């Protein structure tokens, strides 16, 4: 038989108060933890370019390992939308803002507004001009162009016609890559016979520019492409004329389909930019800035009005000869790269 016991009122009240205090402590600790969590706002140009998804994933993962949360926004190639996203981050009072700029010349006012609010700004991969950002981190884009030019010069020898299908000039990296490419071709006898720019990095520009040039009855000896997506479209136009593999096509980013084309023999080379290293280093430096720490860089870059801290990473030329050394098992899997090669 169950017996009924009376619990003294004072004891019951003490238990209730203790439970309330414990709950209050847990809530206070949770609130403090939330307040101490670093929040980084990150706005991308778009995810049209394959590599940006990898940059995003590595950056977010690395930031989380360092105790930070990342609010990722996609501007879909719309400058005004990117400005609105930066303003949104400012209103949320995030601890740092990381920007993959759509237009290197169109964000200086938005960056100034962030800096007035005391929020550090990182220009990721693309410099933001006249903005005095706290950090610019990217690859050596002039070297990217030089690697393309040096390979084309070695492959074609002394002489030939080269078509250029570059990215948009609104991207500050584009003139740097073009400059490096031009420097590598000096005194080579290779002549740039035409230059097109893919606005918004529209890959189909590669097809249209190549098809138009072929329509003149001329065949280029080489095609320098702003990235591997553009290169893929240029090769599609060449394929329609049964010329794929006979024209030296170069690109950058080491996209999977570009690596496949290289081992198949329709694309000559690509420039590999180890984005995992870039994204992880950018996350480390962004978190440090968010915590109010100073970050040191070995170099500075002129943004047109200011000299800003510059963290530079080195790119690597990738051909069929060094694919396995540089890419296989490190950036793409062997089974994927050689998917279409039966005798591998």
Image (cartoon, helix red, strand yellow):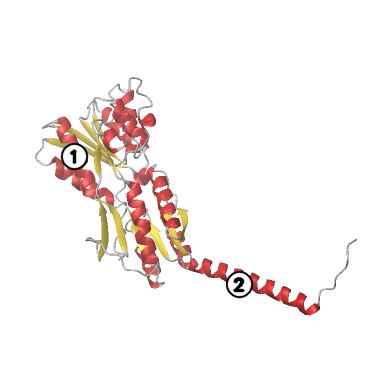
In the image, residue 282 above or below residue 330? below
Q: Whole-percent x and y of residue 237?
A: 33, 28
- Quadrant placement of the N terminus: bottom right
Q: Between 97 and 104, which is closer to the camera in this rendering?
A: 97
> Dividing the picture into quarters, in which one does residue 119 lie?
bottom left
Q: Is residue 63 left or right of residue 4?
A: left
Q: Which residue is mark 1?
A: 149
**Is 10 in front, or is 128?**
10
Quadrant where the image shows the C terminus: top left
For the point 21% across and 39% down, which residue is it?
148
Name the disc covering residue 25, or none.
2
Q: How many other residues sit within 10 Å of disc 2, few (<14), some (14-19) or many (≥20)?
A: few
Q: How many marks?
A: 2
As drawn, is 269 to the left or to the right of 18? left
Mark 2: secondary structure: helix
Q: CA distance from mark 1 to mark 2?
A: 64 Å
Q: Position of residue 327 (x, y in %)?
A: 31, 37
Check the image and report above or below for 298 versus 45: below
């Amino acid at each position: 038989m169950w017996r009924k016991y009376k619990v003294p009122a004072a004891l019951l009240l003490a238990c209730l108060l203790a439970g309330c205090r414990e709950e209050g402590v847990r809530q206070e600790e949770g609130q403090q933890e939330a307040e101490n969590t670093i929040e980084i706002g990150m706005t991308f140009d778009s995810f049209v370019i394959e590599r940006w998804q990898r940059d995003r994933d590595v950056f977010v993962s690395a930031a989380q390992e360092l105790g930070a949360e990342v609010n990722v926004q996609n501007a879909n190639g719309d400058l005004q939308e990117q400005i609105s996203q930066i303003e949104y981050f400012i209103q949320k009072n995030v601890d740092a803002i990381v920007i993959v700029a759509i237009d290197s010349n169109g964000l200086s006012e938005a960056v100034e507004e962030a800096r007035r609010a005391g929020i550090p700004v990182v220009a990721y991969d693309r410099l933001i001009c006249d903005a005095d950002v706290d950090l610019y981190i990217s690859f050596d884009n002039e070297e990217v162009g030089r690697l393309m030019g040096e390979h084309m010069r070695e492959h074609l020898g002394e002489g030939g016609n080269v078509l250029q299908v570059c990215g948009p000039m609104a991207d500050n990296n584009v003139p740097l890559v073009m400059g490096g490419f031009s420097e590598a071709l000096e005194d080579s006898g290779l002549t740039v016979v035409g230059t097109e720019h893919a606005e918004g990095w529209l890959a189909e520009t590669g097809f249209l520019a190549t098809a138009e040039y072929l329509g003149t009855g001329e065949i280029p000896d080489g095609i320098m492409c702003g990235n591997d997506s553009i290169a893929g479209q240029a090769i599609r136009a060449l394929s329609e004329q049964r010329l794929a593999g006979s024209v030296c096509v170069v690109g950058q980013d080491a996209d999977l389909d570009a690596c496949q084309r290289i081992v198949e023999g329709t694309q000559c080379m690509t420039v590999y930019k180890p984005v995992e290293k870039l994204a992880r280093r950018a996350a480390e430096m962004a978190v440090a800035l968010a915590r109010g720490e100073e970050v040191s860089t070995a170099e500075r870059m002129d943004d047109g009005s200011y000299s800003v801290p510059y963290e530079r990473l080195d790119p690597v030329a990738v051909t069929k000869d060094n694919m396995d050394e540089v890419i296989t098992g490190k950036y793409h899997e062997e089974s994927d790269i050689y998917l279409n090669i039966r005798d591998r």
